[in-house]
Amino acid sequence: MSLAETIPLKLQASIDSIIDGVKPSPWLTDADKSDYIEKIKALLIEKNAVLIAHYYVDDELQALAEATGGYVSDSLDMANFGAQHSAKTLVVCGVRFMGETSKILSPEKTVIMPTLDAECSLDLGCPIDEFSQFCDQYPDHEVVVYANTSVEVKARADWIVTSSNAIQIVTHLMAEGKKIVWGPDKHLGKYIQNKTGADMIMWQGNCVVHDEFKLHELEQLMEKYPDAEVLVHPESPESVIAKADFVGSTKQIIAAGKKSLAETLIIATDHGLFYKMSQVVPNKRLIPAPTGGKSATCKSCAHCPWMAMNTLVNLYEALRDSSNTIEVDEATRQKALIPLDRMLDFSHQQGILTAGDA
Ligand code: SF4
């Protein structure tokens, strides 16, 4: 049995224990929330800081980022925004690899996160030593890794990709006759392989949120809403992707929803995206794709347990104390910057990133 088949199974136990250990957010009254929001706004000015939030964090954090001149987007776009912004401190609401990506692109800035315990099952399921050993078995392959990885794994890669540009980058590598070692998301890897026909050896990681979407229950929902369009993130299982009218990254799903003529959209991604989606298409009915059903587990809620660890309270405390800063070893950062820059250059040339991106 290969490393790619054994390591994620061993790590699943630790991932489950982390999920079980997630503490609920402190309950706040509306007055408490307003108080925290005002204090955070004042601290952002005082500390020359900008708030950058991922689509999957709680609505109130996304709203606060927007209200204070910050930004809400996907992970790479968050890092791009931070690199271009004049603020000395970037406050990243999301999960750890997002803070690290911001630090890779902005080493001169202070990067703060509400909590350093917010991880990602893809990152956790792809430890550098095992992944590096895995890559070493295929010395004639290009190592292509998804952005949802540690800075060390990025530093081991030849290319970094996101769900927005992975197909184009893999197609480009195929045209050069390259074979690929892919990590860590097996569903995204399989989707890309199906689309491109690339020769890919897969690490077997998964996202605990998207992995939970259920085919049978989705089919039942589609029967109930036959005119609905189904929008699916490619971290979802192959059987769910097969039912999609559109497959794409969070940003691409929002754009597809805007373009769609359907009145009802069934969406298979973290329900945090519904905040932005309902702003963009306020008159459409938005339905989360099912994660429940007979095979449901306690984690079947379509919301990332680590994203949910970001709160107004720990955001305020981190900003007040200038704590939870992201530190990255400089030599590792410089190595990780090479494939990151390679991806950014490629995406610019192909016109994949938007005009405002780095
Ligand atoms: S939603 Fe999935 S891929 Fe995104 S941070 Fe959470 S575990 Fe990682």
Image (cartoon, rainbow, N blue to C red):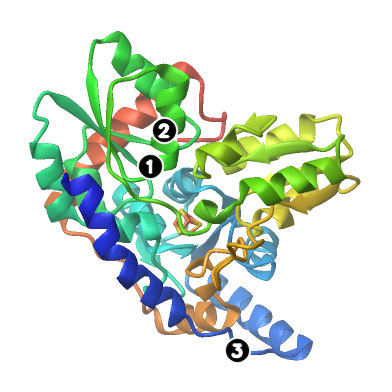
Q: Earlier in the sequence, mark 3 or mark 2?
A: 3
Residue 21 position within the rendered picture, expressed as x and y whole percent measured from the top left? 43, 83
Of discs 3 and 2, which sits in the foreground? 2
What is the three-letter code of the residue carrying label 1?
Answer: Lys
Residue at horizontal 47%, vertical 80%?
22
When asked about the image quadrant of residue 264, the answer is top right
What is the three-letter code of the residue carrying label 2?
Answer: Lys
Residue at horizontal 17%, vertical 42%?
156
Marks 3 and 2, Cα distance to the nearest angstrom?
39 Å
Of discs 1 and 3, which sits in the foreground? 1
Q: Earlier in the sequence, mark 1 or mark 3?
A: 3
Marks 1 and 2, Cα distance to the nearest angstrom?
6 Å
Front-lying residue, 27 or 81: 27
82 with respect to 339 (left or right): right
Residue 305 position within the rendered picture, expressed as x and y whole percent measured from the top left? 51, 70
Front-lying residue, 246 or 338: 246
Establish if 324 lies above or below 147.
below
Residue 186 tag number: 1
Determine whether the residue tagged by mark 1 lies in a helix, strand or loop.
Answer: helix
Determine whether the residue tagged by mark 2 lies in a helix, strand or loop.
Answer: helix
Residue 158 position within the rendered picture, expressed as x and y whole percent measured from the top left? 21, 32
What is the three-letter code of the residue carrying label 3?
Answer: Pro
Q: Which residue is mark 3?
A: 26
Front-lying residue, 171 or 327: 171
Q: Which residue is mark 2?
A: 190
When asked about the image quadrant of residue 36, the answer is bottom right
